Image (cartoon, coloured by chain):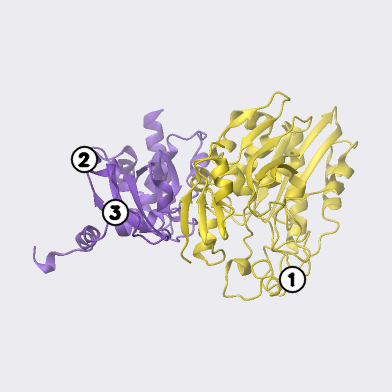
Chain colours: A yellow, B purple
Amino acid sequence: MQPFSFSQARNQDDALVQLRQSGAVAIAGGTTLVDLMKLDVQSPAHLVDINSLPLSRIESLPDGGVRIGAMVRNSDLGHDETVMKRYPVLSQALLAGASAQLRNMATTGGNLMQRTRCYYFRDPAYAACNKRTPGSGCAALEGFNRIHAVLGGSEQCVATHPSDMAVALVALDAVVHVVGPQGERRIPIEEFHKLPGTTPHIETALQNGELITHVTLPKSSFAQRSAYVKLRDRASYEFALASAAVAVDLSGSTIREVRVALGGVATKPWRSHEAEQALTGAPANADTFRAAAEAALKSAKALRYNGFKIELAKMALVRALNQAIQA
Amino acid sequence: MSSTEWNRRSFLKVAAAASAAVAIPEAALSQPPSESRLPPTSKSIRLKVNGTAHQLTVDTRTTLLDALREQLGMPGTKKGCDHGQCGACTVHVNGRRINSCLTFAVMHEGDEITTIEGLAEGGTLHPVQAAFVEHDAFQCGYCTPGQIMSAAALLREPIGPKDDDIREAMSGNICRCGAYPNILAAVKAVRNQRS
């Protein structure tokens, strides 16, 4: 690990000033950052500890939504009664992620900033990684790419986004609130994570010097009837090979409005407008669900070792829809 | 003590005493050593571990795990994977279990840290420790401190009553010997005592 200097942010303004130093990076739970620093994948010159910022509250908003502070721990959010009742897909996604110890550390803001689990990204012994070193190539394209993306990849990068939480947030129309030297911004969750394209090293809409302050969930007709299904190599404490977050508003047995997001199969938390289109206005039954799953994966592109993910993602989506309508 | 009576643990204790870390009474802690002579990549910090405050100087890269083991002479907390994938390093920070390998020591001034060395009270084993003995919930023992710290924290967490709920809540602690059935039995026994 490279040496670094360290300071604590006393408050939000202090954090923003400190983050303007060259090479400064904010540290919250540290579960991604410390790991990647040990691997020499990230080598910040200065760490700003933001753990004492007062951003640890989950508040119900007057308009019926919920505001989640960026420093709320994954365990607190996953077990929060309001979230469990009104946004079950978010609770389920959080509690399906990592382990109890890691969830006690990991924060809402930090989870949004998680980096990929691509083996080649995480191991600097491989020179070729466009995400780590722009222009160096992609070792995964022709390498062992079993865990890589079938959706949203480019010729420069096929690394999957590892978050469960963010997939649920996509199905809930969440908004990410950030603050920086130019003031505050609201970023819809769908625009927060970036497709790799020709710039896989740019992963989010967060600019240098900006800080996530909170995430808001709007009131919606579909959030309450929602579910998360995660499929992986072992039953617990593992990243998704494929996952699905769905939120459904039913009118009788007809789907009035729906949100569909996929995880583990795409380069970013993946909203499937195609699946939503196939579901909206249709009867909630097995045929509709299978048609939606086919639509969601229609543009999927298999690499040498990850073709199995296409069917796996379809099954995750069908199962999530079944769970949601029974909720 | 003759040299042949030296064991690994007494060696670690002496090594720790010779390092910069010392346990000091509360009163003496009001004036930490001047930082002016330290490089920006080192820091003088105060850690409260098992109820005792320690003043120590650390390289900022020192994880909480390494500070406990290498500087404070508490080797009970184990280093397995060192990447948050095995749970051997589990300690409690302010009553909650975390992986001490994925956090820097400098981030924990003012926190109440509890390690396996501080779990027993007044010479009486913590109920989880006693249950691990009773149910033979280990083989080689390397993951055991982490398993016990996890199980002790689990008792305060909002998890369901079923065996599968315990299995899920303990999934962050890997046991390569495969002592899981007995670990489950031990955790279950303590939960039953308490309900």
* Residue at the (44%, 56%) spot, across then down: B101
Secondary element at tag 3: loop
- For label 1, the crowd category at 10 Å Cα-Cα, with few meaning under 14, some 14 to 19 and many 20 or more, is few
**Percent coordinates x, y for residue A82 in the rendering:** 63, 28
Given this view, does label 3 or label 2 mark the residue nearer the observer?
A: 3
Residue A152 in view (yes/no)? yes
Q: Disc 1: which chain?
A: A
Q: Gap in Å between the C-alphas at discs 3 and 1?
A: 48 Å
Q: Is residue A211 above or below residue B95?
A: below
- For label 3, the crowd category at 10 Å Cα-Cα, with few meaning under 14, some 14 to 19 and many 20 or more, is many
- For label 2, the crowd category at 10 Å Cα-Cα, with few meaning under 14, some 14 to 19 and many 20 or more, is few
Q: Which amino acid does label 3 sit on?
A: Met
Q: Gap in Å between the C-alphas at discs 3 and 2?
A: 17 Å
Residue A1 in view (yes/no)? no
Residue lying farthest to the right in this orientation: A281
Q: In this view, does B89 lie above or below A224?
A: below
Residue B15 found in image quarter = bottom left
**Percent coordinates x, y for residue A55 in the rendering:** 57, 37
Q: What residue type is labelled 2?
A: Gly
Give the residue at mark 2. Answer: B123
Q: In the drawing, does residue B29 fall left or right of residue A46?
A: left
Q: Which amino acid does label 1 sit on?
A: Arg
Give the residue at mark 3. Answer: B74
Give the residue at mark 1. Answer: A304
